[in-house]
Structure formats: C-alpha cells, structure tokens
Amino acid sequence: MRSVVLVCLASALAACSSSPPVAPAATSGASTGDAPPAASASADDPYLAKVVVERSAVDVVGDDDARHDILWNAFANQPYEQQFSEMSSADWFPRQARFRARLVELAAAAALDAPGLRRALEALPIAADAPVAEIPVGAFAAHSGADPVWIVVFKWETPELYESDGLLRATSLGHIRIVAVRAADGTVVGEARCM
C-alpha cells in the first residue's frame, strides 16, 4: 500500500511541478537490488545532460573543518551546480537513480575510475523515505593526500508542496551537499553542506 501511495504522490508532484516533467518510474516490480534504469541523457529529463564528471586538482586534506572549507570553496556556488537550483523535488527518488547511473556512465566515457565512482555512490545511499530529496549532479575525481577520492555534489531540499498562482508546486532543489569519498573503499573523508 505504501509504495502505491508513494507512486501516486510522485506522479501528482510531477504533474504539479513548475519544472519540466520527469518520465514516470518503471513499475515492473524490479527489486531495489537490480541495476538502475538506463541513464543516457534524453529529452525526458533535460537536467541529465547537464551533469558534470571531471578530474579536479583539489586535494581534500587537513582536519574536518579544513576539509569542509576545501570542498565548499571549490564546489559550492559554481555555475555547474547552480543550473540545478530550479530542478523540482517532484519524483526525486526514481530520478536520483538515473542521475547516479549517468554519473558512472560519464566517468567510464571519460576513462576515469567508474568502478570507484560507483563504490562512492553506493557508500552514499538514499532511501525513498528520506526526509530530504537529494540528487547527485556532479562528480569530480580528486585526491585526499595519496588516496584517490570522488567528490560527489548533490542538490537537495525538503520535498514539500506549496500553492503558487493557484497551482500546486513542488519545492526546488536549492541546497548543496558535497561529499568526498575514498574511491578504493567508499570511506567518507570530507563533507560540506548548506543548511
């Protein structure tokens, strides 16, 4: 029953959102352990074509405060992540799986450590009933000392509905979370977020 309600709510949010519509989640009954849906950028979600996967010279070192500052200064308030600030929180959970898959696809195409990025993303699970909608929009191959890390940038927001001009709309993903994860074993080595 709960999954039916969530699917109905997600469909209602997508229909009411001011953001471009998102393709509905597949209802094939696939288990959560199955591979994510195909991630190739398409007209179904123009934001998929905007995700960024690049190599970065950033070195995430120092104590927790220093790592926070390094991540924040290098990755927050940048044009690549700000282009996602109007992305709706509607239908966010199935959508984040497509974004995760797209990041790994782009890392492989760029001859970067795609298995390490997959491991990093798996170390940052997101539950369907999470209190915030969170979608990864960028991944950067960097270092923490001698260790290769993936820095994953998420846009997030508390998913809520509000009325505007007589229409029911979903909140936009206006906040940012930046996490550095060691590629070899999925250990989080640094984090920064706005509140």
Image: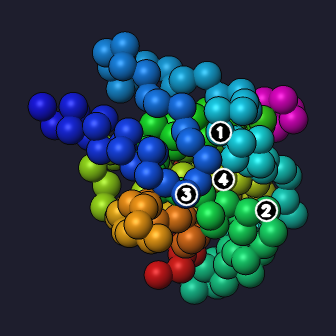
Q: Is residue 52 visible?
A: yes
Residue where numbered disc 4 is placed: 137
Q: CA distance from mark 4 to mark 2?
A: 9 Å
Residue extending farthest to the left is 1
Q: Indicate the position of residue 180 as horizontal and vertical percent values.
A: 62, 61
**Badge 2 amino acid:** Tyr
Q: Indicate the position of residue 40 as horizontal and vertical percent values.
A: 71, 27
Label 3 vs label 2, nearer the camera:
3
Which numbered circle lies on residue 18? 3
- Tell me the magenta residue range: 108-112
Q: CA distance from mark 3 to mark 1?
A: 14 Å
Residue drawn where x is 16% and y is 37% of the image: 2
Q: Indicate the position of residue 147 as horizontal and vertical percent values.
A: 71, 55
Tell which circle, 4 or 1, labels the residue nearer the N-terminal end: 1
Which numbered circle lies on residue 45? 1
Residue drawn where x is 78% and y is 30% of the image: 108
Residue where numbered disc 2 is placed: 80
Q: CA distance from mark 3 to mark 4?
A: 19 Å
User: Between residues 18 and 96, which one lies in front from this camera angle?
Assistant: 18
Secondary structure, mark 1, is: loop
Q: Is residue 166 above or below residue 113?
A: below
Q: Indicate the position of residue 106 as horizontal and vertical percent values.
A: 78, 35
Secondary structure, mark 4, is: strand
**Badge 1 amino acid:** Asp
Q: Tell me where residue 190 sits by quadrant.
A: bottom right
Contact (CB < 8 A) between labels 4 and 2? yes
